[in-house]
Amino acid sequence: MIDNSKNSKILVCDDDETLCYLLKEQLLEEGFSVDAVYDGKYAIEAIKAKNYDVLLLDLNMREVQGEEVLKFVRDSGYELLEVIVLSAQSDIKKAIQCIKNGAYDYITKPYEFDELVLTVKRAIEHRDLIVEKNLYKKVAQKNHSEKIIGESKALQRVLTLTNKA
């Protein structure tokens, strides 16, 4: 697979402005395109305004909490945005809940930067695979539907079953 991570856009959201700035600078040095915001409210605004590939999201913030941002991402049609939660909370129940709510991964602070970059790259690969799979499905459905002529209910059921398969 081709490494598309260098063209990827990352949004960092953490209320610790110093940490946010340092993480942004490190990711820029790695070749990523990076924006940073300091509250969940601004993360939601940024997500609406620009297409990001990965969101690095802290849970505890001043106004809008990270869990609310995660819920927004999953409920608003941004399923291709991979969310990696960065939190000082090492609560396994919280981590499991975030993953169940759609986070790609949950990393506790302090973290090793190299491991974080590796996780970001894997999240981007995961996203790319989903995009590729969806594209193949569309092409297969288009090719499949062009070759079969008929509109009976029985034929439609067969086509539906083959598409599911």
Image (cartoon, helix red, strand yellow):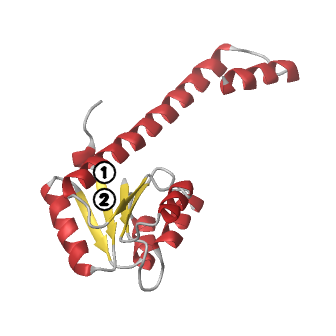
Relative image position of residue 28 (x, y in whole percent)? 17, 60
Q: Which residue is mark 2?
A: 10
Q: Is residue 62 above or below residue 92?
A: below
- Asked if marks 1 and 2 touch (Cβ < 8 Å), the reply is yes
Work out which residue is located at the far bottom of the displayed protein and give it.
62
Q: Is residue 142 above or below residue 36?
A: above
Q: Which residue is mark 1?
A: 120
Instruction: Single out the mark in the foreground, 1 or 2.
Output: 1
**What distance separates the C-alpha of mark 1 from that of mark 2?**
9 Å
Q: Is residue 49 above or below residue 148?
A: below
Relative image position of residue 111 (x, y in whole percent)? 26, 61
Q: Quadrant of the N terminus?
A: top left
Q: Label 1's element?
A: helix
Q: Amino acid at mark 1?
A: Val
Q: Residue at x 40, y 41 (%)?
A: 126
Residue 158 placement: quadrant = top right
Q: Is residue 165 above or below residue 66?
A: above
Relative image position of residue 110 (x, y in whole percent)? 26, 66
Q: Camera-side residue: 91 or 127?
A: 91
